[in-house]
């Protein structure tokens, strides 16, 4: 069991808690091998760069920073449902985890890496939400030359629980129109732009020429995002994840979002390590499940 929020004096010198956007507390990490920022609200990683590199993550210049409001960019944690709730239209999109404060339970240095552990458990508010269960989530963020994100969920209820989860990773690219995502060849997907539930099948790398919102199911493979215009790529390895979502809103949808700059859609792509729809996770009482994504930049 993890302890309470560590005292500032027990934090390693590479970690400081400072006021970030809107005064929200953010853990600022300056490790030997990489730097990062993680908001306590949502345990939301908003920046990560290997030492000497630029941030691989995208943040909207118009993101809101306010209590209870999801940030736009970085790595929101979607839990315990993905997208609109299946039966409750009043429930917030992508679940409650990205809108509530997580506790920074531990932080330490491990070689050149800095490891932070965040913790979230059910509250009266979450128990009266569309997902009324008792749970414990521990999110371990390892900041180094690679960024490792690991979400462990334990069922603390007396009944089996079913949940969806996503590490909704916004990557920065120079031009989405010259970007490809490989690793999903032949994977079945639901095309959410077409609005259907029928499965199509991917052929070759994913390319972008219009709004793209695809939910690949039953795929456990790593992906590589190749940013052709910048001449760099980001590899995303994963474990404990059977789905991948790929999203770019394109011009009209970005223009309709108040927290998304009108022209910023050209500079981002979401490749989300997840377990959604038919890949949702079922846990018996006391059981745990861990989903991990590892990001690495190659030049
Ligand atoms: C993606 C979904 O994961 O998240 C999209 O596939 C959705 O359908 C997008 O529009 C952003 O969601 P939100 O709730 O952060 O605006």
Image (cartoon, grey):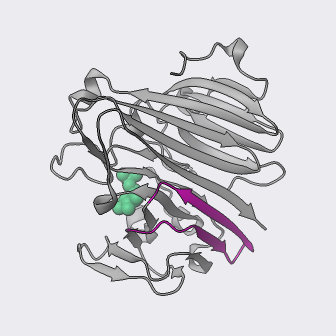
Horizontally, residue 143 falls left or right of residue 213, namely: right
- Comparing 3 with 11, the one in front is 3
Magenta stretch encompasses residue 184: no
Query: Which residue: 48% across, 32% down?
Result: 41
* Residue 26, horizontal then vertical, whole percent: 60, 30
- Comparing 99 with 9, the one in front is 9
* Residue 119, horizontal then vertical, whole percent: 49, 28
Give the vertical position of 181 relative to 91 (above or below). Answer: below
* Residue 98, horizontal then vertical, whole percent: 42, 39
* Residue 151, horizontal then vertical, whole percent: 49, 42
- Comparing 151 with 14, the one in front is 151
Horizontally, residue 131 falls left or right of residue 268, namely: left
Give the vertical position of 283 relative to 134 (above or below). Answer: below
Horizontally, residue 280 falls left or right of residue 187, namely: left
Q: What span is in magenta? A: 218-241
Would residue 85 be visible to someone looking at this image?
yes
Query: Which residue: 71% across, 20% down?
Result: 11
């Amino acid at each position: 069991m993890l302890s309470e929020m560590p005292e500032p004096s027990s934090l390693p010198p590479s970690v400081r808690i400072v006021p970030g956007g809107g005064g929200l507390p953010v853990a600022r990490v300056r490790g030997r091998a990489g730097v990062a920022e993680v908001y306590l609200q949502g345990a939301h990683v908003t920046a990560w760069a290997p030492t000497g590199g630029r941030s691989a993550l995208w943040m909207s210049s118009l993101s809101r920073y306010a209590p209870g409001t999801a940030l736009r960019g970085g790595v929101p944690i979607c839990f315990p449902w993905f997208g609109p709730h299946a039966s409750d239209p009043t429930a917030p999109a992508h679940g409650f985890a990205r809108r509530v404060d997580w506790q920074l339970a531990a932080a330490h240095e491990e070689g050149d890496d800095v490891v932070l552990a965040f913790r979230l458990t059910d509250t009266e508010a979450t128990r009266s939400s569309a997902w009324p269960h008792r749970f414990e989530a521990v999110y371990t963020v390892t900041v180094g030359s690679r960024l490792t994100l690991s979400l462990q969920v334990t069922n603390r209820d007396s009944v089996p629980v079913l949940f969806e989860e996503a590490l909704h990773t916004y990557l920065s690219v120079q031009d989405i129109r010259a970007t490809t995502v490989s690793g999903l060849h032949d994977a079945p997907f639901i095309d959410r732009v077409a609005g259907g539930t029928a499965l199509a099948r991917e052929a070759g790398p994913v390319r972008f020429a219009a709004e793209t919102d695809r939910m690949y199911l039953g795929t456990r493979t790593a992906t590589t995002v190749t940013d052709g215009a910048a001449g760099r790529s980001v590899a995303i390895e994963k474990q404990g994840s059977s789905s991948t979502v790929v999203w770019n809103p394109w011009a009209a949808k970005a223009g309709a979002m108040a927290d998304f700059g009108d022209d910023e859609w050209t500079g981002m792509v979401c490749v989300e390590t997840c377990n959604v729809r038919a890949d949702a996770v079922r846990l018996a009482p006391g059981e745990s499940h861990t989903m991990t994504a590892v990001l690495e930049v190659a030049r």
